[in-house]
Amino acid sequence: MGGFEFMAEQGRALTGDVTFSKDTVTVPAGGVRNVTVTVTLSAEDKAWIREHFENGIYVEGFVYLNDENGVDLSLPFLGFYGDWTQAPVFDTAFWYDNSFFSYAPANGLPEGNEYYNILWTDLGGSDWVLGMNPYTGAVLGADGKIVYDPAHNSVSPNGDGILDGIEEIYLSLMRNAKTLTFTYTVDGEVVYEESIGNASKTSYRSAYGQIVPWIYSWYGRGFYDFADLPSGTEVILTIKGAVDYADGGDHELVIPITVDTKGPELIKVTELPQENGSHYLVIEASDEVDLAFAQLTNTAGTRVFGQTATFETTGDGTKTVTFDITDMGTEFVIALCDYAANESYYALTYLHLRRGRQPA
């Protein structure tokens, strides 16, 4: 279906060999006899399993003991072909996937099992998700997917209650984990680490009447405090899940987070009068993470002349945006906002036919 394969609720007969250590056995009343049964998959069986089950699959069946004079007996067996640690601990769906915001999936297929892996933050009393534009919310790009860049994951730990840090973590676990380890590093050095044992997979909870993910605050000792880190620091959060077998497998979520407590900086304003009488302002700005939103208003803030979350990028990495100010007056305020909800406001004065004015 759509280039994806799904498991049918029916078995597939295998063609391997079954051998017994004894062809016949006599067990006296009250006695015990041991018979070793060896099941060997054929090369065809193995190739088919590897093609259709990249993480391995169960092999099961029955061993029959046929009694010449009495009651036949059967004994079920269950094995696993593959690497037991390979099947993923974490579901594939994240907070920036379409379905989380009630958009249709870009490829028409479910993006996750039931819940999503989510890093929650606070947007002035309401929940928000890390890295999403706090001024526009979730928007779809040309490819039909929600616009998201992990480089926009940023927090502003200034105590204003807006994107100060991580407020909650939901994990959608596909299987039980012996341990979940949360490691925060700066320049390769561990600054905070916590390991939590016996994490159960995402499951239905009748008390809530819904599927409930693994929720950090129910088990963790406390979220990492970004407050002591200087603005511009990049923190890498690695969440590692280990199953209770061998080395636990390679199951990681790696999430970059930048500390950003500085508002965007206005670099330059260029006036562009046109021969047809139209007039434009070209705003050039920069930010430690990225510019998320810009809005041009009158000085009282009562009229919005233009706003955008789309910018052009210059050769040196700054962002530019052009506003049409024809017949809008001469005094303006430009608001520049970033992904950590830091905001900067600049008063601008437009004078006809003068170019390249610096920020007022």
Image: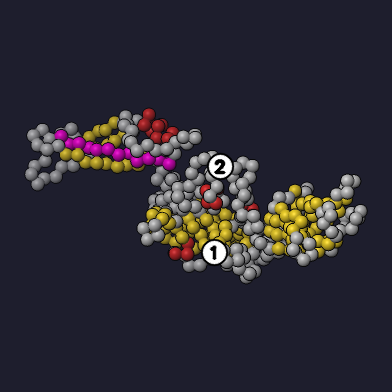
Specify start and end residues of the magenta stretch as a single range.
Answer: 55-66
Q: Is residue 62 magenta?
A: yes
Q: Where is residue 350 in the image (x, y as percent from the top left)?
A: 86, 58
Considering depth in this image, is 37 or 358 the residue closer to the camera? 358
Considering depth in this image, is 235 or 110 the residue closer to the camera? 110
Considering depth in this image, is 121 or 15 the residue closer to the camera? 121
Considering depth in this image, is 171 or 278 the residue closer to the camera? 278
Of circles 1 and 2, the one toward us is 2
Callout 1 crowding tier (Cα within 10 Å): few <14, some 14–19, many ≥20: some
Secondary structure found at label 1: loop
Q: Which residue in the structure is indicated by mark 2?
A: 106
Q: Are marks 1 and 2 in contact (CB under 8 Å)?
A: no
- The C terminus: image quadrant: bottom right
Q: Let me know if residue 315 appears in the view.
A: yes
Q: Let me know if residue 281 appears in the view.
A: no
Whichever of callouts 1 and 2 sits on the residue coming sooner in the sequence is: 2
The residue at 49%/41% (across/down) is: 109
* Relative horizontal placement of residue 24, taking residue 168 as reference (left or right): left
Question: Which quadrant of the figure has residue 156?
Answer: bottom right
Residue 167: numbered disc: 1
Q: Where is residue 135 in the image (x, y as percent from the top left)?
A: 65, 57
